[in-house]
């Protein structure tokens, strides 16, 4: 798999390839024109510069040249834009993403049971398949942008928008909220994980399962702590407590790359630190610190969450 890329210049999807080409062609054309203008400036400043015929230069360089260049770019970019993946919700796989301050809720439909599968901050897609991502927001305006895969699309309160995308190479692509949405806008990241079709089906099947049952005293203590600390007021763990929707669904949190919407690598240590003091990691986040939790309980809770693969 490729590294975690968040770059327009390293396209891994059909739309991103077109956008990346636009970037290079416009940058290249702009550079050539800039260099030519600077060369003319140098020539004009020489002592023995010949007098010009102003009419000719105004008509040629001031009118004819820009009309020619801009028309050519317009024709080319219109032709190239027509090759973008057609925006349509009529795709085999539909995913729904809800933006929240400051994380992403991601929903799938289990093809077997028809039940909804809820996860967070990671969008898994099969490689080579056009996927429709339905977008909405639970609070303010956000914008989904995964530069290596496609352009960006705003998520506007009261409206459902969507983005059709296709990843052509397996890999993990970082995305970012691209519309200022409050204190932690900068730390509202996500990852698109593009998997081979068989691996994607396996992932979806695993994701549809309820949470793993804890094995051993430590993990059992961790699961009990989840209830005692009232984590289930905001978080769902399918098979343990399923009513809350305020925070990310934690049923398979241990299998996610990062916690805190792209902030910290997922492991026992970062989970414990986050639970004990989320405000240090992400000031303003709506999650309160687990007040008065003792070290052993915190370790057990973090171990339990890490084991929820
Ligand atoms: Cu969400 Cu910026």
Image (spheres, rainbow, N blue to C red):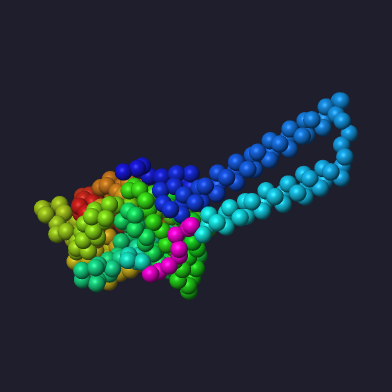
Work out which quarter of the rendered image holds the C terminus and state it.
Answer: bottom left
* Numbered label tally: 0
Q: Is residue 66 above or below residue 101?
A: above
Instruction: Tell me where residue 208 appears, x and y as whole percent.
Output: 22, 64
Horizontal side of 185 relative to 214 (left or right) equals right
Nearest to the observer: residue 84 or residue 118: 84
Please provide percent x and percent y for residue 206.
20, 59
Question: What is the magenta range?
Answer: 83-90
Nearer to the camera, 187 or 234: 187
Q: Nearer the viewer, residue 149 or 183?
A: 149
Using residue 54 as the reference point, say whether residue 116 is left or right of it. left
Residue 114, image quadrant: bottom left
Q: In the rendering, at what x and y percent does residue 285 appear?
A: 42, 58
Residue extending furthest toward the top: 47
* One can see residue 154 in this view: yes
How far from the left and from the top, in percent, is residue 234? 32, 66
Viewer-side residue, 226 vs 262: 262
Quadrant in which residue 10 is drawn:
top left
Q: Residue at x 79, y 45 (%)?
A: 60
Is 186 situated left or right of 29 in this image? Answer: left
Residue drawn at x 45%, y 65% is 87
- Return the residue found at the far bottom: 158
Res 183 seen here: no
Q: Main secondary structure of the magenta part?
A: loop
Which residue shows up at 34% across the image and 54% down it? 128
On-image quarter of the N terminus = top left
Residue 179 part of the magenta-drawn span: no
Residue at 63 percent across and 43 percent down: it is: 29
């Amino acid at each position: 798999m490729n590294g975690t890329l968040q770059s327009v210049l390293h396209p891994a999807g059909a739309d991103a390839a077109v956008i990346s080409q636009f970037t290079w062609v416009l940058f290249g054309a702009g550079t050539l024109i800039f260099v030519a203008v600077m060369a003319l400036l140098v020539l004009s400043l020489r002592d023995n510069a010949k007098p010009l015929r102003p009419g000719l230069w105004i008509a040629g360089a001031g009118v004819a040249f820009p009309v020619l260049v801009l028309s050519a770019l317009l024709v080319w970019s219109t032709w190239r834009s027509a090759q973008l993946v057609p925006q349509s919700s009529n795709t085999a796989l539909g995913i729904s993403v809800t933006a929240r301050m400051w994380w992403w809720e991601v929903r799938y439909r289990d093809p077997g049971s028809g039940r909804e599968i809820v996860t967070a901050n990671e969008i898994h897609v099969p490689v080579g398949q056009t996927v429709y991502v339905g977008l909405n927001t639970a609070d303010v305006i956000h914008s989904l942008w995964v530069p290596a895969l496609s352009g960006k699309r705003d998520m506007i309160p009261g409206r459902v928008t969507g983005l059709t995308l296709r990843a052509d190479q397996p890999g993990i692509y970082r995305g970012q909220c691209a519309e200022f949405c409050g204190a932690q806008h900068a730390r509202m990241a996500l990852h698109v994980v593009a998997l081979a079709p068989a691996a994607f089906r396996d992932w979806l099947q695993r994701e549809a399962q309820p949470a793993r049952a804890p094995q051993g005293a430590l993990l059992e203590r961790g699961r009990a702590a989840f209830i005692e600390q009232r984590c289930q007021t905001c978080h769902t763990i399918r098979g343990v407590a399923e009513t809350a929707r305020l925070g990310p669904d934690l049923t398979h949190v241990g299998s996610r790359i990062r916690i805190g919407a792209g902030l910290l690598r997922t492991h026992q240590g970062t989970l414990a630190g986050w639970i004990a003091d989320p405000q240090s990691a992400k000031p303003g986040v709506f999650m309160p610190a687990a007040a008065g939790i003792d070290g052993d309980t915190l370790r057990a809770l973090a171990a339990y969450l890490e084991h929820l693969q």
